[in-house]
């Protein structure tokens, strides 16, 4: 077992945090914070590859495909978190972005013994979700060698999917199973092997970049406003109306009128106001322009002075 871990960056002792057990609370926090500040610098050189991964995802979405995150433990939970935020933020169907964790949803809260050690379980989960050539699968593992994730990546490639590996070590077994590798090497953890810390934070930052940029590229954002959000509770209803007002600078009564006429569909309400059309015409303009608000308005020859 020691030989398995000895070569992993995430399993080395961090000399900068030696004797952390002798520090007071504020000193511990400052040390953790200093390590966290190193994360974004380590990710910056990866941006071209992260962009390439996002472009794969955009193409998948445009062809009716899906995005799957696959991981175990912290990595699996982060994938589920990012996937679960897409429907309320971008109005996507739950099937469009999915997180799969070794051991199933029980493992979100409780450890499932042996789940991450089975390549067969990873492969079986790919079969169960009917992964296909239009899909993108992102395998996430800090070590880059989790059997469940490797098994899932291998089967996903066999089924024709585009496979991306996200790890926090260089030259891992993931490389043989991936079409594209994202190696976010952030160095040893504050506490040896606690990859929920810097490694997990790096993973979350990259997942944010992948889904957010992909959603922008398929028309889910106008200017920098989340215009495809699902107003499923009182807070989001207020946010939806505020977004319409910010996008259009229309008076409150006009915003409320358009919001209600559109059935709470923010994009439609914005096009109604800025293009000065009724609800049906606004929907048609959006359909004709693949859901992009800016293009829908521009197609009518209306100037977009607000965004």
Image (cartoon, grey):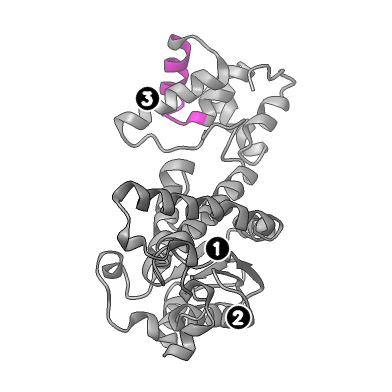
* Total labels drawn: 3
Q: Which of marks 3 and 1 is nearer the N terminus?
A: 1
Q: Quadrant of residue 289?
A: top right
Real-space CA distance between mark 3 and mark 2, rounded to the nearest whole angstrom: 45 Å
Rendered view: 252 above or below 173: above
Using the image, tell me which numbered label, if any, was put on residue 186: 1
**Mark 2, secondary structure of its residue:** helix
Picture residue at 34% right of the left edge, 37% below the top:
232
**Mark 1, secondary structure of its residue:** loop
Check if residue 252 falls in the magenta segment: no
- Provide residue 243's location: percent of width, then percent of height: 49, 25
- Provide residue 170's location: percent of width, then percent of height: 61, 75
Query: Label 1 neighbourhood size at 10 Å, few (<14), some (14-19), many (20+)?
Result: many
Q: Earlier in the sequence, mark 1 or mark 2?
A: 2
179 lies left or right of 14: right
Picture residue at 32% right of the left edge, 84% below the top:
114
Q: Mark 2 points at which residue?
A: 177
Q: Quadrant of residue 169?
A: bottom right
48 lies left or right of 242: right
Q: Give the range drawn in magenta.
A: 253-266
**Mark 3, secondary structure of its residue:** helix
Q: Which-is-in-front pick, marks 3 and 1?
A: 1
- Quadrant of the frame with the N terminus: bottom left
- In terms of depth relative to the viewer, which is nearer, 87 or 83? 83
Rendered view: 200 above or below 307: below
Real-space CA distance between mark 3 and mark 1, rounded to the nearest whole angstrom: 39 Å
Query: Label 2 neighbourhood size at 10 Å, few (<14), some (14-19), many (20+)?
Result: many
Say whether marks 1 and 2 touch (CB < 8 Å).
no
Q: Name the residue under label 3.
A: 238
Using the image, tell me which numbered label, if any, was put on residue 246: none
- Provide residue 165's location: percent of width, then percent of height: 58, 71
């Amino acid at each position: 077992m020691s030989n398995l871990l000895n070569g992993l960056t995430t399993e080395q002792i961090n000399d900068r945090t030696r004797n952390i057990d002798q520090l007071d609370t504020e000193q511990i926090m400052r040390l953790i914070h200093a390590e966290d500040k190193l994360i974004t610098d380590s990710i910056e050189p990866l941006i071209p590859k992260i962009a390439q991964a996002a472009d794969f995802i955009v193409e998948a979405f445009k062809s009716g495909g899906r995005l799957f995150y696959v991981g175990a433990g912290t990595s699996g939970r982060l994938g589920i978190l990012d996937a679960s935020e897409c429907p309320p933020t971008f109005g996507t169907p739950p099937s469009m972005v999915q997180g799969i964790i070794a051991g199933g949803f029980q493992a979100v809260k409780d450890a499932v013994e042996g789940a991450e050690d089975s390549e067969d379980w990873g492969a079986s989960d790919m079969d169960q979700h009917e992964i296909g050539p239009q899909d993108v699968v992102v395998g996430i593992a800090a070590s880059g060698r989790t059997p469940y994730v490797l098994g899932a990546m291998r089967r996903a490639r066999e089924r024709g999917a585009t496979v991306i590996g996200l790890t926090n070590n260089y030259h891992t077994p993931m490389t043989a199973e991936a079409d594209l590798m994202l190696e976010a090497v952030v160095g040893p953890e504050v506490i040896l092997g606690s990859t929920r810390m810097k490694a997990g934070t790096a993973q979350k930052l990259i997942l944010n970049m992948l889904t957010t940029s992909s959603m922008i590229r398929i028309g889910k954002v106008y200017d920098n406003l989340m215009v495809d959000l699902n107003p499923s509770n009182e807070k989001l209803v207020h946010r939806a109306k505020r977004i319409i007002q910010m996008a259009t600078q229309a008076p409150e009564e006009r915003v409320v009128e358009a919001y209600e006429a559109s059935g709470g569909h923010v994009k439609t309400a914005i096009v109604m106001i800025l293009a000065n059309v009724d609800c049906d015409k606004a929907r048609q303009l959006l359909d004709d322009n693949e859901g992009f608000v800016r293009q829908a308005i521009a197609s009518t020859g209306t100037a977009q002075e607000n965004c």
